[in-house]
Amino acid sequence: MSEQATLSRRTLLKASALAGGGLVLTASIPMVARAATAAAGGPAEATLNAFVSIAPDNTITIVGKNPEIGQGIKTMLPMLIADELDADWNQVRVTQAESDAARFGPQLAGGSFATPMNWMPMRQVGAATRQMMLAAAAQRWGVDAKGLKTELGKVIEVSSGRSATYGELASDAAKLSPPDPATVTLKDPKAFHIIGRAIGGVDSPRVVKGEPIFGVDTQLPGMVYAAFERSHVFGAKLKSANLDAVKAEPGVIDAFVIEGNGNAEQLVDGVAILSNNWWLANKAREKLTIEWDNGPWGDHSSQRYDETARAAMASGKPQEPIVSHGDVDAAFASAAKVLDQEYFYPFLAHVPMEPQNCTALMHDDGAIEFWAPTQNPQAGQGSVAQMLGITPDKVRLHITRMGGGFGRRLTNDFMHQAAAIAQKVPGTPVQLIWSREDDVRSDFYRPAGWHRLRAAIDADGKLTGFDDHFVTFSLPGAGAYNPAAMAPDIFPAKYVPNLRYAQTQMETRVPMGALRAPSSNALAYVMQSFLDEVAVETGKDLPTLLLEMIDGREKEPDERGFMGVSPGFNPDRMRGVITKAMAMANWGKPVADGHALGFGFYFSHMGYFAEVVEASLSDRKQVQVHNVWAAGDVGSHIINPFGALNQVEGSIIDGIGQAMGLAVQIENGGAKQSNFHDYQLPRMPITPKIHTEFVITDNAPTGMGEPALPPVIPALTNALFKLTGKRVRSLPIDTKLFA
Amino acid sequence: MTDLIVNDRPVRFNMDPQTPLLWALRDAANLTGTKYGCGSGDCGACMVLIDGEALRSCLVTLAECEGRVVVTVEGLSRDRSHPVQQALVAEQAIQCGFCTPGIVMAAAALLRTNADPSEDQIKQAITNLCRCGVYPRLVRAIQRAGRVTRRAERISAAPAPGIDAKDAAAAVPAMRAD
């Protein structure tokens, strides 16, 4: 196994740059830190470290440190601790951590990072806590800890059989100094009794009862609701607003202008309206008349971007190189056959089911407290502190459960808005809620993109040259993370002898951000579709072409990243999932009349997924997906099969939904779409049967939130080509192509 | 003023009668289980039972509820014991869970008229949006809830608040599932 993120006594996880949130992370998991014991009457709980407390009744409370967006992390991370602690899962209760880098280390829901970042540290926390229980028992009985073992929440003396529960030992253990996590002995994975078990979400019983656990369910004494009106034109500035007319509306407590700071990721210009019920606050927006200065952005449109991009691609002259090797021009000059095609994918919105919201309370001393559904709490604390001109320790943030994230909540604009509103009414808690229309029209969209792809095929049918002219957007003022960028190592970069990726950028003010499997959710479609074209041209199928391309190739070197060492791309793992998916789907065997199979493979977020889609067309030429077979390699353990399967199934339905009908169009400088009637998410009837299997390999476990999504889109479009002979080169799929 | 029955209790709402039931429940009655997802009747996150029928509470005004019986997800059962609640937990047909209350109500209404729905019937009846994509599990969960409704199966997946299912079963032998 490669080196991984691990804990040492002081600095446990150091991070420099994080792709996926545009933030810089330098944090540690100081497991020696003890949370203040929050015993409100009754026998005291013994707090053993920041993550584990044990009550005399033997209840073990484990803190889930990362934000829960439905990916199951609030269940999964505590499972790692509980297993190494040798707890009985039935005695475990899980609570949600506040945002606190000093106590909990990095807290982030994004990039499928939680598993690789926490696999070792959380196990070390559990193992160190277990060692404290052993030491406490050894001390109490006056024996050597070597003769003791643990089992389901008990320490047992092997020779005598006498035992003590963790609850009985906890208060003694709390007096001991915790061991250095780097020195504790971890379990032999064969002894795992929680890791690998399908365990239900710890909040699920509360979810089905409708208990108030989401951000928007926050209720505080004296709380008021806020609606926020902003321009539909991105980058517009507010000139004037008729606040008096709005203040006269029934139920309106107050209305005021919020002056933005020019950074859409923080605060844009707008008007806030406060009321005792959100419906009234939102309804009062109808009476608003705001004069906006659109600047140069009011006539931007998808159509204009498309015309500019098509002209750039036709010119054959990209602005700048991304990566280049071999002699691409020579490969094309000597080619027996050249493929030359343009691909397009649109802007996409995230639309998590819970619209953006945030509850904020400005205290009299200038400190601010949030109840925030954010995937990226620590970054939010930092940038709000900066905006308000206070130190980050004056920003307290309660992380709430979230009704989905998909990357939208990595950007904390709603926190800044709530802060700016709360600042105007100190002492009064404010709950800012966006309407669905606000959410769709004020997103950080998955960037649209255009690719002119060329392939050179020699007389022997070998792919000798590959050229991609990518047309994308420049993002003035964007942070370190550019969601519209294409990495130089995107497959097949290193697997074609003569290859060039180059780009042209267009200026825009359309806000962009990471959508589940950022960049991969678009590039898998483009690359795997075009490689399917190459395969068809050379008389092969796509998996055969892919296996030929990686034949004889070695694993790429590991890279040092923010989470320690991230393992290099491994062709063997790619081969493993490709051959597995082929076997699962009976690839190459006859299928039902009028049906066809399509293939897609992608490597993203450290995970390898190969997927096969079985599709047909209805009498009305509507796309029908019958089966999807998915083979994934995310390492040595599927920590919680419930969560992992849910992520694969959800990713596949997400990808099919994107391919079949999702696009945001820009018109007059803003988003044309506004709600679910014109941004139509997949519903039950389109759901295929999904068959998932994992290829278990001797690699550290990696995350599941994203890597199963990208390959399903090309697998679907490749199936439709097989079925109809028509190539889908523009998303979403336009069924007129098949008429 | 509007008088109606909410979760077995008579409630008088001193609000604009044009207020959508959704916001009356959430902001006035503190029943936040009913979720706002779109405000236009598309997503189904706000479904409640009104006189037994699953309706989108964002499209129903308080005035239209005068004298009617409203059941929200909080009132479907006192102890999470409704077969749909148990089955959704047992099948883990929950990811983020924000659409879940609406789906619970839609499925409860379906099973009331058809306790043995086919896959197609479920797909037609449950028009709710789930952004996370738990749809394949939802079919299984609702069919399983149907079996529980028909007394063909028992589930104890989501214990009543404060009570562990195992403890309950140990104390009351008749509750043991096996």
Image (cartoon, rainbow, N blue to C red):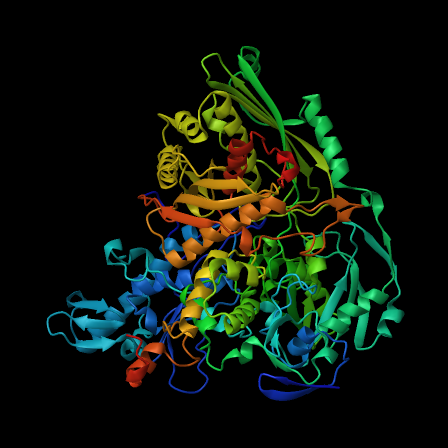
The location of residue B144, given as percent across then percent down, is: 41, 66
Depth check: B90 or A149 in front? B90
Q: Is residue A161 left or right of residue A711?
A: left
Query: Quadrant of the rendered structure where residue A417 is?
Result: bottom right
| Rendered position, A126 above or below A1 | below
Query: Quadrant of the rendered structure where residue B177 is?
Result: bottom left
In the image, what residue occupies the spot 68% across and 66% down?
Answer: A433
Q: Is residue A552 left or right of residue B146?
A: left
The location of residue A166, given as percent across then percent down, is: 28, 75
| Rendered position, B89 above or below B11 | above
Work out whether residue A319 can be spotted.
yes
Q: Is residue A106 left or right of residue A423?
A: left
In the image, what residue occupies the spot 37% across and 85% down?
Answer: A43
Q: Which residue sits furthest left?
A: A159
Quarter of the rendering occupied by the C terminus of chain B:
bottom left
Q: How many marks?
A: 0
In the image, what residue occupies the spot 45% across and 26% down?
Answer: A495
In the image, what residue occupies the spot 44% across and 80% down?
Answer: B161
Work out whether residue A403 can be spotted.
no
Depth check: A647 or A498 in front? A647
Depth check: A3 or B127 in front? B127
| Rendered position, A166 above or below A616 | below
The location of residue A421, given as percent across then percent down, is: 73, 67
Quarter of the rendering occupied by the N terminus of chain B:
bottom right
Q: Is residue A389 left or right of residue B76?
A: right
The location of residue B174, given as percent across then percent down, is: 30, 83
